[in-house]
Amino acid sequence: MATVEIVGIPQSTYTRVIRIACEEKGVPYELRIAPPHTPDIDAIHPFGKVPGFRHGDFELCETTAIARYLDAAFPGPALFPADPRTAALAEQWVSLVNSQMDRTLIRQYLTAYVFPKTPDKSPDRAAIDAVVADVRSQLALLDKAVADTGYLAGDTFSYADANVLPILAYLVNLPESGEAIAAAPHLPAYLARLNERPSVKNTVPPPPPGR
Ligand SMILES: N[C@@H](CCC(=O)N[C@@H](CS)C(=O)NCC(=O)O)C(=O)O
């Protein structure tokens, strides 16, 4: 069978999601390094976003679509639950994270630390202060979601957990979000549980480019 190729950068949260998905399924893959908006990724994603995906002559973009393909085309443990309600809950959390939380937690909050627009490249305090209340409330939402079963959908790991892990892995190391996670009743154990998985251990990103 043709080799799976993930096109992206290891620091990208969404690229890591697909790497985790491959690792969970036991699908061997090659990571082809291509930052957003470079020719290799522009050839696959109409808006130049990573990750892209290739399997033989089949090319695909958009993380959830890629994960759906991996789950359907390869044997190995299911990424998406089979039970209708658990499956719908997994979709719900993937959608909430992708449509809202990624913007707040990564594109606004993390970026204000890692790619600040300040003249001296120090953390962008105004941007952080503007978003920190939303960061705290979204982390509280996730904390509540994992309180009962220890996972976002049902009582086992699913793609919903894979999809949020790369975000939390960055946030645990930033001041305000790190404090909020540490003080939350359930998130520290949730993160520790996910961090034990080989798929998570095998995909720890290097420092952001330029750092
Ligand atoms: N909707 C896309 C989002 C992917 C995405 O936002 N990737 C980020 C890196 S983690 C990116 O390429 N950002 C560059 C940009 O938005 O211009 C997906 O689900 O794959």
Image: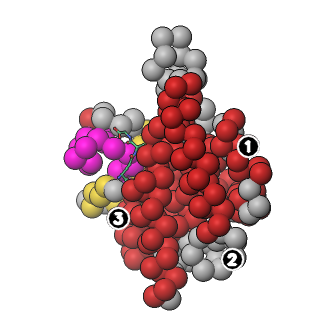
Report the number of numbered marks. Answer: 3
How busy is the neighbourhood of tag 2: few (under 14 within 10 Å), some, or many (20 plus)? few
Q: Nearer the viewer, residue 209 or 85?
A: 85
- Residue 50 falls within the magenta-colored stretch: yes
Q: Which residue is mark 2?
A: 149
Nearer to us in this view, 174 or 79: 174
- In which image quadrant can residue 132 be found? top right
Residue 192 is left or right of residue 25, and the answer is: right
Q: Residue at x 27, y 48 (%)?
A: 45
Q: Which of pointers 1 and 2 lies earlier in the amino acid sequence?
A: 2
Q: Is mark 3 within 8 Å of ligand 1?
A: yes
* Element type at mark 3: helix
In this rendering, the answer to whether 26 lies above or below 49 is below
Query: Magenta span covers which residues?
Result: 40-54
Task: Where is residue 166? Give x, y as percent.
Answer: 57, 51
Q: Earlier in the sequence, mark 1 or mark 3?
A: 3
Q: Residues within 10 Å of mark 1 (few under 14, many from 20)?
A: some
User: Where does residue 157 sit, x and y in percent of width and height?
Assistant: 62, 72
Q: Is residue 156 left or right of residue 120?
A: right
* Residue 65 badge: 3
- Residue 170 falls in image quadrant: top right
Q: CA distance from mark 1 to mark 3?
A: 34 Å
